[in-house]
Amino acid sequence: DGGITQSPKYLFRKEGQNVTLSCEQNLNHDAMYWYRQDPGQGLRLIYYSQIVNDFQKGDIAEGYSVSREKKESFPLTVTSAQKNPTAFYLCASSDYYGYTFGSGTRLTVV
Amino acid sequence: EDQVTQSPEALRLQEGESSSLNCSYTVSGLRGLFWYRQDPGKGPEFLFTLYSAGEEKEKERLKATLTKKESFLHITAPKPEDSATYLCAVRANTGNQFYFGTGTSLTVIP
């Protein structure tokens, strides 16, 4: 079955640590996205990529970094510069017909 | 500026009590309006895509309609399993990016 796989489902980060969230898709979509979801704030775009080896900042890119070395993969690194990283992170990919979302990663700072 | 507003923020219904959720939008050329359902701790699940004013789509107890300024998600005789957050998103003619509303949290009480 085609879809998007995010891992891990739950992630705990210590202060000052960088952590990487994985996102893999087998839908053959060119475009991929990372969103952050906080209660009452809806989905906020962190980074997006329209094609391999190219990506653009979204609305809240500070403290995050991404790479797009393969069409199937779009990992997100939450750096120590992100002061409030506790949130639910969603990866998505899209084609002409719409978005497909992964199941999300819940990141908690401990 | 492309914008999506959903109302109400939260809605509580008795089982069987029909109602509607609203999604109003401003976009420079609508390429598609999308409805998603999101359960707690999970990624959004695709429900409908609407492309032009007057279009309607139905799935079980849900019916989505579209005008030039807004979309409605009608829920007929809801059941407790319909409880979820419903997200609306629009895609403009320019680019692949979606613009999301903040969602309506629906609770159906048995």
Image: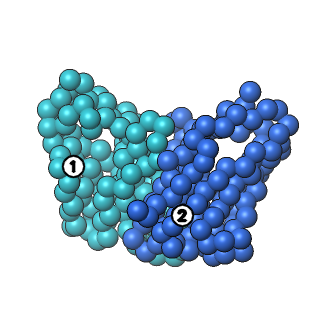
Q: Which quadrant of the structure image shows residue A31?
A: bottom right
- Both on one chain, marks 2 and 1? no
Question: Left or right: B36 with respect to B1?
Answer: left
Residue projecting furthest to the right: A16
Chain B drawn in what color? cyan
Which amino acid lies under the numbered mark 2 shown in the image of this protein? Answer: Gln
**Front: mark 2 or 1:** 2
**Vertical order, A47 against B74 (above or below):** below
The residue tagged 1 is B62
Determine crowd level at label 1: few under 14, some 14-19, many 20+ residues with C-alpha closer than 10 A: some
Going by the numbered disc 1, the residue's amino acid type is: Leu
**In the rendering, at what x and y percent does residue A72 appear?**
59, 68
Residue shown at 17% from the left, 46% from the top: B61
Q: Secondary structure at mark 1?
A: strand
* Whole-number angstrom distance, CA of label 2 to CA of label 1: 29 Å
Check the residue under mark 1 and report the chain it is in: B
Q: Is residue B17 left or right of residue A84?
A: left
| Total numbered badges shown on the rendered structure | 2
Callout 2: SS = strand
Question: Residue under mark 2: which chain is it in?
Answer: A
Q: Quadrant of residue B15?
A: top left
Q: Quadrant of residue B84?
A: top left
Residue with the mark numbered 2? A25
Give B24 or B41, whichever is nearer the viewer. B41
Residue count near mark 2 (Cα–Cα under 10 Å), binned few <14, some 14–19, many ≥20: many
| Residue that appears at 66% across and 71% down | A70
Q: If the image is split into quadrants, where does the N terminus of chain A sit?
A: bottom left
Which quarter of the rendering shows the C terminus of chain A?
Answer: top right
